[in-house]
Image (tube, rainbow, N blue to C red):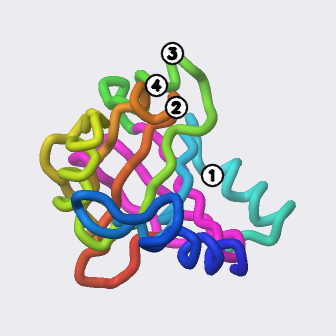
Amino acid sequence: MRARDDRHRDGGAGGSGGSGAAGGAPVRGLSHVAIAVRKAEPLAALLVAALGATRGAEELLDGGALRVLFVHLGPVTLELLEPRSPEHTVAKFLEKRGEGLHHVSLEVADIDAALARCRASGVTPIDETPRPGAHGTQVAFLHPKGLGGVLVELCQAGGSGTTSG
């Protein structure tokens, strides 16, 4: 956890992630890292057996078209994305790129303010407005072309106070 604590301290108003037109750094920390898979069970079982991971919650999103299974490795949460429909964007991702890293999710306190800050800085949102995510969160994705080729999800906790299951 020390790295996370240092990141928060260094990212304040005096750090490189510091102040701007929208105030201090809007990112609170890493919510999760998402991995696109054809089947979540084999990878979840391997992570448990090989690395001592614990299985977290799972749920269906997008009208049942996407199964998400959370796996916890100490302070790190992985979100395994298993499409249940060939039309889902994750299924199309798998067709084009195969299994692997899908996105990095960053926890924010105020998703609307974070989206506004991104737009003002020239980062293009994929989602113009936040939408429902797992565990009652609100999420919005940012286009990878503006962020070093990585799909980034902004994630604001819902009523449960947790974004990682």
Asked if labels 4 and 3 touch by Cβ distance under 8 angstroms, the answer is yes
Residue under label 4, please give it. 93
How dense is the environment of label 2, judged by Cα within 10 Å: few (below 14), some, or many (20 and up)?
few
Mark 3 or 1, nearer chain start? 1
Is residue 8 toward the left or the right of residue 63 in the image? right
Instruction: Single out the mark in the foreground, 4 or 1.
Output: 4
Is residue 26 toward the left or the right of residue 56 in the image? left
Residue under label 1, please give it. 41
| Span colored in magenta | 55-83
The quarter of the image holding the N terminus is bottom right
Q: Quadrant of residue 18?
A: bottom left
Secondary structure category for the residue under label 1: helix
Q: Quadrant of residue 160?
A: bottom left
Secondary structure category for the residue under label 3: helix
| Main SS, magenta residues | strand
| Real-space Cα separation, disc 4 to disc 2, in angstroms | 18 Å
Please, what is the three-letter code of the amino acid marked with disc 4? Phe
> Of the numbered discs in the image, which one, if any, rests on residue 148?
2
Q: Is residue 76 magenta?
A: yes
Mark 2 or 3, nearer chain start? 3
Looking at the image, which is closer to me, 94 or 45? Answer: 94
Residue sitting at 76 percent across and 65 percent down? Answer: 48
Please, what is the three-letter code of the amino acid marked with disc 1? Glu
Residue under label 3, please give it. 96
Secondary structure category for the residue under label 2: loop
Asked if labels 2 and 4 touch by Cβ distance under 8 angstroms, the answer is no
Inspect this view and state whether residue 165 appears.
no
Q: Quadrant of residue 113?
A: bottom left
